[in-house]
Image (cartoon, grey):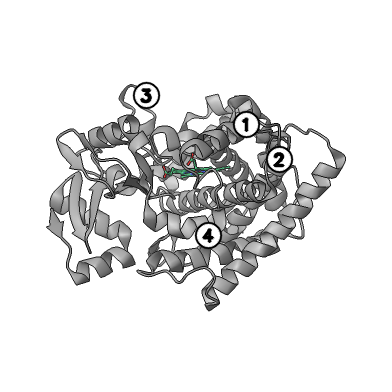
């Protein structure tokens, strides 16, 4: 075990991503350090990831660094809940993400993307991360709550940004001011959260008034009954809604932002992708059935998620001590799993730094789910993983069918690594219309 000195602790707080990579290089796939009395394990070894998260998952809770910040806005929603609460809530929310339901979301996603792109003019400059965040926010609202955010999308987007920006600052704080203390950050975050919840309350009240079961997530939550036959308390309902809003839009927007960044740097990949889309779709709108015929599209998204996994790492705390593959994990130890570090290990990937979607076309040599895990591993794997993959592919295909985007600035992009992995500065791109063959 290595004891971290003051400058290393500071480096960890400032840039977790580089720090974890350095520890992995120095100490291997299970790097055990002591940070101010906390046992910290950075785990990027597939066999250990499997053993710990699959076979010992019941001895783990979410890590305290994430929990103390995320619970402030996600409350006891499915992302934050533990034990029986979590099992009940996951079971309740899961049906909204079944394959059969997800198929029906394809048209909503394609229509929303077409609407966005059709409003653009050739020569226009768009801030790609911002427009994609608004698009994914509209999609989550329409698919989960059957609500069309039109004029209010910008407002809700700003509130969400406020909640997350303050959350990001809080992640860096060694000592978090209690929620009741009226610090500027607490006040801004709470005001934004109140505004989002008040908006959600209106949506919920409108639906409850009609009593209509539209079969979407909101109806599922409203119709849920516990063993005593009571409906879900309003606070819990709001926590679930905020959780899905937060978890369900920024991550996919970040993934797509990175895809556009990579495509702009790799014109041969862009050309191959366009050729595949032209051949299968021509000018017609993409449908769910088309996805099987578009393997390169899927490979491009997967390769982006390998190089830039938006949820670049996740943590757990050991609640009951255990041994796994020769390692002892004591009670209260904090385990950090880094998809970013594992996805770039040179002993696991050939040319790990290169953007090569073809690596995902070789289905005989697919990486296993502990070597490639942009959506996590085990029972707490991303609830929205199939939704997110569908959404990313449909948005990307629909955009590429209608427009070309080229970068306006050519400075190298710096990664921001707080709640999601994304470019630190906005990515400005210029719109043009593709040359038809
Ligand atoms: C590219 C997009 C996405 C990525 C990379 C991603 C990644 C992840 C990861 C790594 C986790 C696991 C965290 C852990 O084990 O501690 C997770 C959990 C979760 N994600 Fe996603 N996610 C994405 C999109 C979505 C979408 C679209 C939704 C919902 C619509 C969603 C909802 C959730 C929820 C509810 C959890 C918590 C699951 C639980 O604890 O049981 N995510 N996500």
- Label disc, if present, on residue 363 of the rendered structure: 3
Please tell me which residue lies in front, 11 or 295.
11
x and y percentages locating residue 320 in the rendered image: 29, 40
Give the mark toward the camera: 3 or 4.
4
Residue 45 visible in the displayed image:
yes
* Residue drawn where x is 71% and y is 38% of the image: 231
Indicate which disc, 2 or 1, sits on the residue closer to the N terminus: 1
Q: CA distance from mark 3 to mark 4?
A: 42 Å
Mark 1 sits near ligand 1, with its Cβ under 8 Å away = no
Q: Which mark is residue 72?
A: 4
Q: Report the side of 276 relative to 282 (left or right).
A: left
N-terminal of the two: label 2 or label 3?
A: 2
Q: How far is disc 2 from disc 3 in space, using C-alphas?
A: 38 Å
Q: Position of residue 270 (x, y in %)?
A: 48, 44
Q: Nearer the viewer, mark 2 or mark 3?
A: 2
Circle 1 — which element? helix
- The relative height of residue 122 versus residue 377 in the rendered view (above or below) is below
Q: Nearer the viewer, mark 3 or mark 1?
A: 1
Q: Are marks 2 and 1 in contact (CB under 8 Å)?
A: no
Q: Which mark is residue 102?
A: 1
């Amino acid at each position: 075990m290595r004891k971290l000195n003051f400058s290393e602790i500071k480096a960890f707080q400032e840039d977790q991503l580089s720090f974890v990579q350095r520890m992995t290089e120095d100490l291997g796939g299970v790097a055990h350090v002591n940070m101010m009395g906390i046992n910290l394990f950075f785990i990027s070894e597939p066999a250990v990831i499997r053993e710990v998260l699959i076979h010992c998952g019941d001895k783990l809770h979410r890590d305290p660094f994430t929990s103390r910040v995320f619970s402030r806005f996600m409350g006891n929603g499915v992302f934050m809940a533990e034990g029986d609460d979590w099992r009940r809530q996951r079971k309740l929310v899961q049906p909204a993400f079944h394959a059969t339901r997800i198929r029906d979301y394809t048209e909503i996603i394609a229509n929303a993307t077409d609407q966005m792109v059709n409003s653009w003019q050739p020569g226009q400059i768009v801030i790609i991360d911002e427009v994609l965040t608004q698009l994914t926010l509209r999609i989550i609202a329409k698919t989960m709550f059957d609500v069309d955010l039109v004029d209010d999308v910008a407002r809700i987007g700003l509130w969400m940004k406020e909640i997350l920006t303050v959350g990001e600052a809080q992640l860096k704080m060694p000592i978090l001011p209690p929620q009741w203390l009226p610090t500027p950050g607490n006040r801004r975050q709470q005001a934004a959260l109140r505004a989002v919840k008040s908006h959600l309350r209106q949506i919920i009240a409108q639906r409850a008034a009609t009593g209509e079961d539209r079969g979407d997530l909101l109806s599922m939550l409203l119709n849920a009954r516990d063993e005593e036959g009571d409906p879900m308390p309003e606070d819990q309902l709001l926590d679930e809604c905020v959780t899905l809003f937060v978890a369900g839009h920024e991550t996919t927007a970040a993934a797509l932002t990175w895809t556009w960044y990579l495509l702009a740097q790799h014109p041969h990949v862009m050309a191959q992708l366009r050729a595949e889309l032209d051949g299968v779709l021509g000018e017609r709108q993409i449908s769910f059935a088309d996805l099987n015929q578009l393997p390169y599209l899927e490979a491009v998204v997967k390769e982006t998620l390998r190089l830039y996994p938006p949820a670049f790492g996740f943590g757990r705390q050991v609640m009951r001590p255990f041994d796994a593959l020769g390692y002892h994990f004591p009670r209260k130890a904090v385990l950090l799993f880094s998809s970013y570090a594992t996805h770039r290990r040179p002993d696991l990937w050939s040319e790990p730094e290169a953007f090569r979607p073809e690596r995902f076309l070789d289905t005989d040599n697919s990486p296993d789910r502990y070597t490639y895990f942009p959506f996590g591993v085990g029972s707490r794997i991303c609830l929205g993983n199939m939704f997110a993959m569908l959404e990313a592919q449909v948005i990307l295909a629909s955009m590429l069918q209608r427009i070309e985007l080229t970068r306006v600035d050519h400075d190298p992009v710096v990664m921001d690594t707080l709640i999601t992995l994304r470019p630190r500065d906005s990515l400005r791109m210029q719109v043009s219309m593709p040359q038809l063959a």
